[in-house]
Image (tube, rainbow, N blue to C red):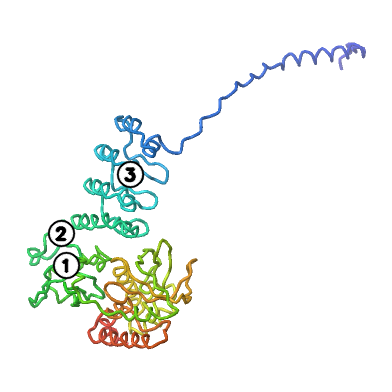
Amino acid sequence: MNNATCFNPSPALRAASAALLLLIAAACDRRAPEPVPAATPPAPAAKTEPDIFDAIRVSDAAAFDAWIADPSSLINLRGAEQTTPLIETARYGRTLFLRPLLERGADPKLADLNGHTALHIAARDGRTEICRLLVEAGADPVAADFDGLTPFDLAMMMGHSSTADYLVEARARFLARPVTETVPEDTAAVIPEAILLSTDFRTWTSASGQQIEAAFIQSVFDMVVLQQPDGAMVRIALNRLAPADQVLARQLSGIDPHALARVRPQRVTAAKKTDSIAADIGDKKGWTVLESCRLLKTGSNDGDSFHVIHDGKEYIFRLYLVDAAETDNAFPDRVKDQARYFRLDEKDTVRLGREAAKFTTSVLASGSFTVYTRWEDARGNSSLPRYYALVETSHGDLDELLTREGLVRQYGMPIDGRDADRKQARLKRLEQEARSQGVGAWGKLSETADNR
Protein backbone atom coordinates (compact mmCIF):
# COMPACT_ATOMS: atom_id res chain seq x y z
CA MET A 1 0.00 0.00 0.00
CA ASN A 2 1.33 3.46 -0.92
CA ASN A 3 1.65 5.64 2.16
CA ALA A 4 1.64 8.84 0.10
CA THR A 5 -0.88 11.39 1.22
CA CYS A 6 -4.00 11.47 -1.01
CA PHE A 7 -5.24 14.80 -2.42
CA ASN A 8 -8.79 15.50 -1.31
CA PRO A 9 -10.24 18.67 -2.97
CA SER A 10 -12.78 20.74 -1.17
CA PRO A 11 -16.47 20.65 -2.22
CA ALA A 12 -16.25 24.14 -3.72
CA LEU A 13 -13.32 23.16 -5.91
CA ARG A 14 -15.12 20.02 -7.06
CA ALA A 15 -18.19 22.04 -8.10
CA ALA A 16 -16.03 24.49 -10.06
CA SER A 17 -14.22 21.64 -11.82
CA ALA A 18 -17.51 20.01 -12.84
CA ALA A 19 -18.82 23.25 -14.31
CA LEU A 20 -15.58 23.67 -16.31
CA LEU A 21 -15.82 20.14 -17.72
CA LEU A 22 -19.38 20.79 -18.88
CA LEU A 23 -18.27 23.93 -20.70
CA ILE A 24 -15.43 22.05 -22.43
CA ALA A 25 -17.73 19.22 -23.49
CA ALA A 26 -20.27 21.66 -24.89
CA ALA A 27 -17.55 23.41 -26.88
CA CYS A 28 -16.28 20.11 -28.30
CA ASP A 29 -19.79 19.00 -29.32
CA ARG A 30 -20.70 22.22 -31.12
CA ARG A 31 -21.94 21.49 -34.70
CA ALA A 32 -22.25 23.70 -37.68
CA PRO A 33 -25.77 25.07 -38.07
CA GLU A 34 -28.04 23.23 -40.51
CA PRO A 35 -28.38 25.12 -43.80
CA VAL A 36 -31.79 26.56 -44.46
CA PRO A 37 -33.26 24.71 -47.50
CA ALA A 38 -33.85 26.88 -50.50
CA ALA A 39 -37.37 27.23 -51.75
CA THR A 40 -37.98 24.47 -54.34
CA PRO A 41 -40.07 25.55 -57.30
CA PRO A 42 -43.08 23.27 -57.92
CA ALA A 43 -42.48 20.52 -60.48
CA PRO A 44 -44.27 21.09 -63.75
CA ALA A 45 -47.36 18.96 -64.18
CA ALA A 46 -46.48 15.81 -66.08
CA LYS A 47 -48.02 15.62 -69.53
CA THR A 48 -49.94 12.44 -70.11
CA GLU A 49 -49.40 12.61 -73.89
CA PRO A 50 -46.60 13.99 -76.06
CA ASP A 51 -47.21 17.30 -77.87
CA ILE A 52 -47.80 15.55 -81.20
CA PHE A 53 -51.09 14.10 -79.98
CA ASP A 54 -52.27 17.56 -78.94
CA ALA A 55 -51.20 18.95 -82.31
CA ILE A 56 -53.18 16.29 -84.16
CA ARG A 57 -56.21 16.75 -81.93
CA VAL A 58 -56.45 20.51 -82.52
CA SER A 59 -55.14 20.34 -86.12
CA ASP A 60 -52.08 22.47 -85.33
CA ALA A 61 -50.29 22.23 -88.70
CA ALA A 62 -47.25 24.25 -87.61
CA ALA A 63 -46.60 22.05 -84.58
CA PHE A 64 -47.16 18.91 -86.64
CA ASP A 65 -44.79 20.07 -89.40
CA ALA A 66 -42.08 20.84 -86.84
CA TRP A 67 -42.49 17.44 -85.22
CA ILE A 68 -42.55 15.44 -88.46
CA ALA A 69 -39.47 17.31 -89.76
CA ASP A 70 -37.43 16.43 -86.67
CA PRO A 71 -35.41 13.24 -87.43
CA SER A 72 -35.44 12.32 -83.74
CA SER A 73 -39.25 12.18 -83.59
CA LEU A 74 -40.61 8.68 -82.92
CA ILE A 75 -43.11 8.12 -85.71
CA ASN A 76 -44.74 5.12 -83.98
CA LEU A 77 -44.79 6.81 -80.60
CA ARG A 78 -47.26 5.31 -78.14
CA GLY A 79 -49.60 7.57 -76.21
CA ALA A 80 -52.50 7.00 -73.85
CA GLU A 81 -54.20 3.60 -74.36
CA GLN A 82 -51.35 2.60 -76.72
CA THR A 83 -52.60 4.89 -79.46
CA THR A 84 -50.18 6.17 -82.13
CA PRO A 85 -50.01 9.42 -84.12
CA LEU A 86 -51.38 7.53 -87.13
CA ILE A 87 -54.34 6.18 -85.15
CA GLU A 88 -55.10 9.66 -83.79
CA THR A 89 -54.85 11.11 -87.29
CA ALA A 90 -57.52 8.64 -88.42
CA ARG A 91 -59.63 9.33 -85.33
CA TYR A 92 -59.77 13.07 -85.97
CA GLY A 93 -59.89 12.82 -89.76
CA ARG A 94 -56.65 14.75 -90.34
CA THR A 95 -56.12 13.68 -93.93
CA LEU A 96 -53.35 16.24 -94.51
CA PHE A 97 -51.30 14.70 -91.68
CA LEU A 98 -51.76 11.15 -92.93
CA ARG A 99 -49.43 11.13 -95.94
CA PRO A 100 -46.43 12.64 -94.10
CA LEU A 101 -46.82 10.06 -91.34
CA LEU A 102 -46.98 7.17 -93.78
CA GLU A 103 -44.02 8.56 -95.77
CA ARG A 104 -41.98 8.69 -92.56
CA GLY A 105 -42.74 5.03 -91.90
CA ALA A 106 -45.80 5.07 -89.61
CA ASP A 107 -46.95 1.45 -89.24
CA PRO A 108 -50.64 1.09 -90.25
CA LYS A 109 -50.83 -2.36 -88.62
CA LEU A 110 -50.24 -1.16 -85.05
CA ALA A 111 -53.29 -1.37 -82.79
CA ASP A 112 -54.39 0.29 -79.56
CA LEU A 113 -55.53 -1.37 -76.34
CA ASN A 114 -58.83 -2.34 -77.98
CA GLY A 115 -57.17 -3.96 -80.96
CA HIS A 116 -58.19 -1.06 -83.20
CA THR A 117 -55.83 -0.09 -85.99
CA ALA A 118 -56.06 3.25 -87.77
CA LEU A 119 -58.14 1.46 -90.42
CA HIS A 120 -60.65 0.24 -87.81
CA ILE A 121 -61.04 3.81 -86.53
CA ALA A 122 -61.44 5.31 -90.00
CA ALA A 123 -63.93 2.62 -91.05
CA ARG A 124 -66.00 3.08 -87.91
CA ASP A 125 -66.30 6.81 -88.64
CA GLY A 126 -66.96 6.36 -92.37
CA ARG A 127 -63.76 8.07 -93.53
CA THR A 128 -63.44 6.34 -96.90
CA GLU A 129 -60.53 8.40 -98.22
CA ILE A 130 -58.46 7.73 -95.12
CA CYS A 131 -59.31 4.05 -95.42
CA ARG A 132 -58.06 4.08 -98.99
CA LEU A 133 -54.77 5.75 -98.07
CA LEU A 134 -54.21 3.31 -95.22
CA VAL A 135 -54.93 0.24 -97.34
CA GLU A 136 -52.60 1.49 -100.06
CA ALA A 137 -49.92 1.87 -97.37
CA GLY A 138 -50.33 -1.75 -96.27
CA ALA A 139 -53.11 -1.69 -93.67
CA ASP A 140 -54.74 -5.10 -93.19
CA PRO A 141 -58.44 -4.89 -94.21
CA VAL A 142 -59.26 -8.28 -92.67
CA ALA A 143 -57.62 -7.69 -89.27
CA ALA A 144 -60.01 -8.24 -86.37
CA ASP A 145 -60.09 -6.22 -83.17
CA PHE A 146 -60.42 -7.80 -79.72
CA ASP A 147 -64.17 -8.20 -80.28
CA GLY A 148 -63.55 -10.05 -83.54
CA LEU A 149 -64.72 -7.14 -85.69
CA THR A 150 -63.01 -6.20 -88.95
CA PRO A 151 -63.00 -2.68 -90.42
CA PHE A 152 -65.79 -3.81 -92.77
CA ASP A 153 -67.88 -4.99 -89.80
CA LEU A 154 -67.51 -1.63 -88.04
CA ALA A 155 -68.43 0.30 -91.17
CA MET A 156 -71.54 -1.87 -91.67
CA MET A 157 -72.58 -1.60 -88.03
CA MET A 158 -72.37 2.20 -88.15
CA GLY A 159 -74.26 2.41 -91.44
CA HIS A 160 -71.38 3.70 -93.59
CA SER A 161 -72.34 1.81 -96.75
CA SER A 162 -69.90 3.53 -99.12
CA THR A 163 -66.99 2.84 -96.78
CA ALA A 164 -68.14 -0.77 -96.41
CA ASP A 165 -68.33 -1.14 -100.19
CA TYR A 166 -64.77 0.10 -100.56
CA LEU A 167 -63.56 -2.29 -97.84
CA VAL A 168 -65.17 -5.25 -99.60
CA GLU A 169 -63.14 -4.41 -102.69
CA ALA A 170 -60.00 -3.83 -100.62
CA ARG A 171 -60.54 -7.15 -98.89
CA ALA A 172 -60.85 -8.96 -102.21
CA ARG A 173 -57.57 -7.48 -103.43
CA PHE A 174 -55.88 -8.27 -100.13
CA LEU A 175 -56.91 -11.91 -100.26
CA ALA A 176 -56.07 -12.24 -103.95
CA ARG A 177 -52.53 -13.37 -103.25
CA PRO A 178 -50.65 -16.47 -104.39
CA VAL A 179 -51.45 -19.65 -102.48
CA THR A 180 -48.53 -20.52 -100.24
CA GLU A 181 -49.91 -23.71 -98.71
CA THR A 182 -47.92 -26.80 -99.64
CA VAL A 183 -49.98 -29.16 -101.77
CA PRO A 184 -49.27 -32.49 -103.46
CA GLU A 185 -47.28 -32.19 -106.68
CA ASP A 186 -50.03 -33.72 -108.80
CA THR A 187 -52.49 -30.99 -107.79
CA ALA A 188 -50.21 -27.97 -107.53
CA ALA A 189 -50.54 -27.21 -111.25
CA VAL A 190 -54.30 -26.78 -111.05
CA ILE A 191 -54.50 -24.80 -107.79
CA PRO A 192 -55.93 -21.33 -108.50
CA GLU A 193 -53.26 -18.65 -108.45
CA ALA A 194 -55.25 -16.56 -105.99
CA ILE A 195 -57.52 -17.25 -103.06
CA LEU A 196 -60.99 -16.07 -103.99
CA LEU A 197 -63.32 -14.15 -101.79
CA SER A 198 -65.82 -16.66 -100.48
CA THR A 199 -68.58 -14.67 -102.15
CA ASP A 200 -66.99 -14.82 -105.59
CA PHE A 201 -68.79 -17.17 -107.95
CA ARG A 202 -66.42 -19.61 -109.60
CA THR A 203 -66.46 -23.03 -111.22
CA TRP A 204 -66.24 -25.88 -108.71
CA THR A 205 -65.27 -29.32 -109.97
CA SER A 206 -66.17 -32.65 -108.40
CA ALA A 207 -63.86 -35.67 -108.36
CA SER A 208 -65.96 -37.16 -111.19
CA GLY A 209 -65.51 -34.05 -113.36
CA GLN A 210 -68.93 -32.46 -112.92
CA GLN A 211 -68.85 -28.66 -112.65
CA ILE A 212 -71.10 -25.94 -111.22
CA GLU A 213 -70.80 -22.19 -110.80
CA ALA A 214 -71.22 -21.29 -107.14
CA ALA A 215 -69.90 -19.25 -104.23
CA PHE A 216 -68.43 -20.92 -101.14
CA ILE A 217 -70.60 -20.58 -98.03
CA GLN A 218 -69.07 -22.77 -95.33
CA SER A 219 -67.94 -26.26 -94.40
CA VAL A 220 -69.78 -28.21 -91.70
CA PHE A 221 -68.44 -31.60 -90.67
CA ASP A 222 -66.50 -31.83 -93.96
CA MET A 223 -69.65 -31.12 -95.95
CA VAL A 224 -69.03 -28.13 -98.24
CA VAL A 225 -71.98 -25.75 -98.71
CA LEU A 226 -72.04 -23.75 -101.96
CA GLN A 227 -74.55 -21.24 -103.27
CA GLN A 228 -75.42 -20.99 -106.96
CA PRO A 229 -76.19 -17.64 -108.66
CA ASP A 230 -79.94 -18.25 -108.38
CA GLY A 231 -79.63 -18.62 -104.60
CA ALA A 232 -79.95 -22.42 -104.51
CA MET A 233 -77.76 -24.21 -101.98
CA VAL A 234 -75.58 -27.12 -103.07
CA ARG A 235 -73.88 -29.49 -100.64
CA ILE A 236 -71.05 -31.86 -101.46
CA ALA A 237 -68.72 -33.91 -99.29
CA LEU A 238 -65.26 -32.38 -99.18
CA ASN A 239 -63.62 -35.59 -100.39
CA ARG A 240 -65.89 -35.59 -103.46
CA LEU A 241 -64.40 -32.34 -104.73
CA ALA A 242 -61.41 -32.25 -107.05
CA PRO A 243 -58.16 -32.10 -105.03
CA ALA A 244 -57.50 -28.46 -105.93
CA ASP A 245 -60.99 -27.43 -104.81
CA GLN A 246 -60.59 -29.36 -101.56
CA VAL A 247 -57.57 -27.20 -100.74
CA LEU A 248 -59.43 -24.02 -101.71
CA ALA A 249 -62.47 -24.96 -99.61
CA ARG A 250 -60.27 -25.53 -96.56
CA GLN A 251 -58.58 -22.18 -97.07
CA LEU A 252 -61.83 -20.29 -97.52
CA SER A 253 -63.33 -21.97 -94.46
CA GLY A 254 -60.55 -20.56 -92.33
CA ILE A 255 -60.49 -17.13 -93.93
CA ASP A 256 -64.10 -16.06 -93.93
CA PRO A 257 -66.48 -16.96 -91.10
CA HIS A 258 -69.07 -14.59 -92.58
CA ALA A 259 -69.34 -16.17 -95.97
CA LEU A 260 -73.02 -15.80 -96.72
CA ALA A 261 -72.86 -12.16 -95.67
CA ARG A 262 -70.75 -11.24 -98.66
CA VAL A 263 -72.86 -12.72 -101.50
CA ARG A 264 -73.08 -10.14 -104.26
CA PRO A 265 -76.40 -8.29 -103.97
CA GLN A 266 -77.17 -8.37 -107.71
CA ARG A 267 -76.93 -12.15 -107.70
CA VAL A 268 -79.09 -12.53 -104.62
CA THR A 269 -81.86 -10.25 -105.84
CA ALA A 270 -82.26 -12.47 -108.88
CA ALA A 271 -83.04 -15.42 -106.65
CA LYS A 272 -86.58 -16.38 -105.75
CA LYS A 273 -87.16 -15.49 -102.11
CA THR A 274 -88.84 -17.94 -99.78
CA ASP A 275 -92.18 -16.66 -98.52
CA SER A 276 -91.84 -15.64 -94.90
CA ILE A 277 -94.19 -17.19 -92.38
CA ALA A 278 -92.48 -15.04 -89.75
CA ALA A 279 -93.95 -11.97 -91.47
CA ASP A 280 -97.43 -13.54 -91.36
CA ILE A 281 -97.09 -14.35 -87.68
CA GLY A 282 -95.65 -10.93 -86.82
CA ASP A 283 -98.53 -9.20 -88.57
CA LYS A 284 -100.91 -10.31 -85.83
CA LYS A 285 -102.01 -8.24 -82.84
CA GLY A 286 -99.59 -8.18 -79.93
CA TRP A 287 -96.47 -8.40 -82.06
CA THR A 288 -93.91 -5.63 -82.53
CA VAL A 289 -92.07 -5.31 -85.84
CA LEU A 290 -88.51 -3.95 -85.77
CA GLU A 291 -87.31 -3.22 -89.29
CA SER A 292 -83.78 -2.41 -90.50
CA CYS A 293 -82.10 -4.22 -87.62
CA ARG A 294 -78.35 -4.81 -87.67
CA LEU A 295 -76.30 -7.52 -86.02
CA LEU A 296 -74.06 -6.41 -83.15
CA LYS A 297 -71.28 -8.96 -83.11
CA THR A 298 -70.21 -10.01 -79.62
CA GLY A 299 -68.57 -13.06 -78.14
CA SER A 300 -71.85 -14.12 -76.54
CA ASN A 301 -73.74 -14.50 -79.85
CA ASP A 302 -74.52 -18.06 -80.87
CA GLY A 303 -76.72 -19.90 -83.32
CA ASP A 304 -80.09 -18.97 -81.81
CA SER A 305 -79.31 -15.94 -79.60
CA PHE A 306 -77.68 -12.68 -80.64
CA HIS A 307 -77.33 -8.96 -79.99
CA VAL A 308 -79.13 -6.57 -82.33
CA ILE A 309 -79.03 -2.82 -82.94
CA HIS A 310 -82.30 -1.13 -83.86
CA ASP A 311 -82.74 2.63 -84.06
CA GLY A 312 -79.58 3.10 -82.00
CA LYS A 313 -80.69 0.79 -79.17
CA GLU A 314 -79.25 -2.61 -78.31
CA TYR A 315 -81.42 -5.71 -77.80
CA ILE A 316 -80.82 -9.42 -77.29
CA PHE A 317 -83.16 -11.82 -79.08
CA ARG A 318 -83.55 -15.59 -78.87
CA LEU A 319 -85.26 -17.54 -81.65
CA TYR A 320 -88.64 -19.17 -81.10
CA LEU A 321 -89.17 -22.86 -81.97
CA VAL A 322 -85.56 -23.97 -82.58
CA ASP A 323 -82.52 -24.63 -80.44
CA ALA A 324 -78.88 -24.49 -81.56
CA ALA A 325 -76.29 -26.61 -79.80
CA GLU A 326 -74.10 -25.06 -77.13
CA THR A 327 -70.77 -23.60 -78.22
CA ASP A 328 -68.94 -24.85 -75.11
CA ASN A 329 -69.42 -27.16 -72.13
CA ALA A 330 -70.52 -24.50 -69.65
CA PHE A 331 -73.88 -26.32 -69.37
CA PRO A 332 -72.96 -30.03 -69.60
CA ASP A 333 -76.48 -31.34 -69.01
CA ARG A 334 -77.80 -29.24 -71.89
CA VAL A 335 -75.00 -30.47 -74.15
CA LYS A 336 -75.81 -34.09 -73.28
CA ASP A 337 -79.49 -33.54 -74.08
CA GLN A 338 -78.61 -31.96 -77.42
CA ALA A 339 -76.15 -34.75 -78.19
CA ARG A 340 -78.93 -37.33 -77.67
CA TYR A 341 -81.20 -35.46 -80.09
CA PHE A 342 -78.60 -35.22 -82.84
CA ARG A 343 -77.13 -38.64 -81.99
CA LEU A 344 -73.68 -37.10 -81.78
CA ASP A 345 -70.99 -37.32 -79.16
CA GLU A 346 -70.60 -34.27 -76.93
CA LYS A 347 -67.47 -33.02 -78.69
CA ASP A 348 -69.21 -32.99 -82.07
CA THR A 349 -72.28 -31.39 -80.49
CA VAL A 350 -70.22 -28.42 -79.32
CA ARG A 351 -68.59 -28.26 -82.74
CA LEU A 352 -72.07 -28.19 -84.29
CA GLY A 353 -73.01 -25.29 -82.01
CA ARG A 354 -70.02 -23.29 -83.18
CA GLU A 355 -70.88 -23.94 -86.82
CA ALA A 356 -74.44 -22.77 -86.15
CA ALA A 357 -73.08 -19.57 -84.58
CA LYS A 358 -70.93 -18.94 -87.65
CA PHE A 359 -73.87 -19.50 -89.96
CA THR A 360 -76.17 -17.15 -88.02
CA THR A 361 -73.47 -14.48 -88.04
CA SER A 362 -73.08 -14.97 -91.78
CA VAL A 363 -76.77 -14.50 -92.46
CA LEU A 364 -77.39 -11.58 -90.11
CA ALA A 365 -74.20 -9.73 -91.04
CA SER A 366 -75.28 -9.62 -94.69
CA GLY A 367 -77.36 -6.51 -94.13
CA SER A 368 -80.49 -5.35 -92.39
CA PHE A 369 -83.18 -7.78 -91.23
CA THR A 370 -86.58 -7.68 -89.54
CA VAL A 371 -87.34 -8.88 -86.02
CA TYR A 372 -90.84 -9.89 -84.88
CA THR A 373 -91.30 -10.11 -81.12
CA ARG A 374 -93.97 -10.18 -78.41
CA TRP A 375 -91.33 -9.23 -75.79
CA GLU A 376 -91.61 -12.59 -74.03
CA ASP A 377 -88.78 -13.00 -71.54
CA ALA A 378 -86.21 -15.53 -72.78
CA ARG A 379 -84.08 -15.13 -69.66
CA GLY A 380 -80.31 -15.25 -70.08
CA ASN A 381 -77.10 -14.32 -68.28
CA SER A 382 -76.63 -10.81 -69.67
CA SER A 383 -77.42 -7.58 -67.85
CA LEU A 384 -79.70 -6.75 -70.79
CA PRO A 385 -83.07 -8.55 -70.98
CA ARG A 386 -83.42 -11.18 -73.69
CA TYR A 387 -86.63 -11.68 -75.67
CA TYR A 388 -87.98 -14.41 -77.93
CA ALA A 389 -88.31 -13.42 -81.57
CA LEU A 390 -88.67 -14.53 -85.17
CA VAL A 391 -86.20 -13.12 -87.69
CA GLU A 392 -86.79 -12.52 -91.40
CA THR A 393 -83.72 -11.96 -93.60
CA SER A 394 -83.22 -11.41 -97.32
CA HIS A 395 -82.30 -15.10 -97.53
CA GLY A 396 -85.41 -16.32 -95.70
CA ASP A 397 -86.53 -16.87 -92.11
CA LEU A 398 -83.49 -17.54 -89.94
CA ASP A 399 -85.04 -20.53 -88.13
CA GLU A 400 -85.73 -22.19 -91.49
CA LEU A 401 -82.24 -21.49 -92.84
CA LEU A 402 -80.68 -23.07 -89.76
CA THR A 403 -82.98 -26.09 -89.96
CA ARG A 404 -82.31 -26.57 -93.68
CA GLU A 405 -78.58 -26.72 -92.93
CA GLY A 406 -79.02 -29.28 -90.12
CA LEU A 407 -77.73 -26.87 -87.49
CA VAL A 408 -80.64 -26.75 -84.99
CA ARG A 409 -83.18 -29.04 -83.37
CA GLN A 410 -86.94 -28.53 -83.20
CA TYR A 411 -87.08 -27.49 -79.59
CA GLY A 412 -87.84 -24.22 -77.85
CA MET A 413 -90.50 -21.70 -76.94
CA PRO A 414 -93.67 -22.46 -79.00
CA ILE A 415 -96.06 -20.00 -80.64
CA ASP A 416 -99.85 -20.32 -80.84
CA GLY A 417 -101.97 -19.73 -83.92
CA ARG A 418 -102.68 -21.08 -87.37
CA ASP A 419 -99.62 -19.43 -88.93
CA ALA A 420 -97.49 -20.80 -86.12
CA ASP A 421 -98.75 -24.29 -86.97
CA ARG A 422 -97.70 -23.68 -90.58
CA LYS A 423 -94.29 -22.59 -89.38
CA GLN A 424 -93.78 -25.70 -87.25
CA ALA A 425 -94.93 -27.95 -90.10
CA ARG A 426 -92.43 -26.33 -92.43
CA LEU A 427 -89.62 -26.68 -89.91
CA LYS A 428 -90.38 -30.38 -89.47
CA ARG A 429 -90.35 -30.87 -93.23
CA LEU A 430 -87.05 -29.02 -93.59
CA GLU A 431 -85.50 -31.14 -90.85
CA GLN A 432 -86.66 -34.33 -92.54
CA GLU A 433 -85.07 -33.13 -95.80
CA ALA A 434 -81.83 -32.29 -93.99
CA ARG A 435 -81.79 -35.74 -92.42
CA SER A 436 -82.37 -37.48 -95.74
CA GLN A 437 -79.67 -35.41 -97.44
CA GLY A 438 -77.15 -35.89 -94.62
CA VAL A 439 -76.79 -32.16 -94.04
CA GLY A 440 -75.07 -30.60 -91.02
CA ALA A 441 -75.50 -32.73 -87.91
CA TRP A 442 -77.25 -35.38 -89.93
CA GLY A 443 -74.13 -35.85 -92.03
CA LYS A 444 -72.52 -37.31 -88.93
CA LEU A 445 -75.52 -39.48 -88.11
CA SER A 446 -74.45 -42.63 -89.93
CA GLU A 447 -70.92 -42.36 -88.56
CA THR A 448 -71.90 -42.00 -84.92
CA ALA A 449 -75.04 -44.17 -84.90
CA ASP A 450 -73.06 -47.26 -85.84
CA ASN A 451 -70.84 -46.77 -82.80
CA ARG A 452 -73.64 -46.53 -80.25
Marks 2 and 1, how far apart at CA: 10 Å
| Residue located beneath label 2 in the image | 179
Residues packed near mark 1 inside 10 Å, few (<14), some (14 to 19) or many (20 plus) = many
Task: Using the image, determine if residue 10 lies above or below residue 452.
Answer: above
Foreground mark, 2 or 3? 3
Of the 4 image quadrants, the one containing the N terminus is: top right
Labelled pair 3, 1 in contact (Cβ < 8 Å): no
Residue 202 is situated, as x and y percent measured from the top left of the image, at: 13, 67
Q: Residue at x 35, y 82 (%)?
A: 409
- Of badges 3 and 1, nearer the viewer stands 3
Q: Is residue 318 left or right of residue 86?
A: right
Which residue is labeled 3 in the image?
93
Amino acid carrying mark 2 in the image: Val
Identify the residue at image location x=37%, y=71%. Answer: 302
Give the class, few, some or many, for how many residues have Cα within 10 Å of label 3's Cα (few <14, many ≥20). Answer: many
Report which residue position mark 1 lands on: 247
Q: CA distance from mark 3 to mark 1?
A: 42 Å
* Residue name at image x 22 percent, y 67 percent: 263
| The C terminus lies in quadrant | bottom left
Residue 267 occupies quadrant: bottom left
Secondary structure beneath disc 1?
Answer: helix
The earlier-in-sequence mark between 3 and 1 is: 3
The disc placed on residue 359 is none
Cα–Cα gap, marks 2 and 3: 36 Å
Which one is nearer the viewer's eye here, 364 or 259?
364
Q: Mark 2 touching mark 1, by CB under 8 A?
A: yes
For label 2, count other residues whose C-alpha is less than 10 Å away and answer few (under 14), some (14-19) or many (20+).
some
Residue type indicated by callout 1 = Val
User: At numbered mark 2, what does the secondary structure look like: helix, strand or loop?
Assistant: loop
Q: Quadrant of residue 314?
A: bottom left
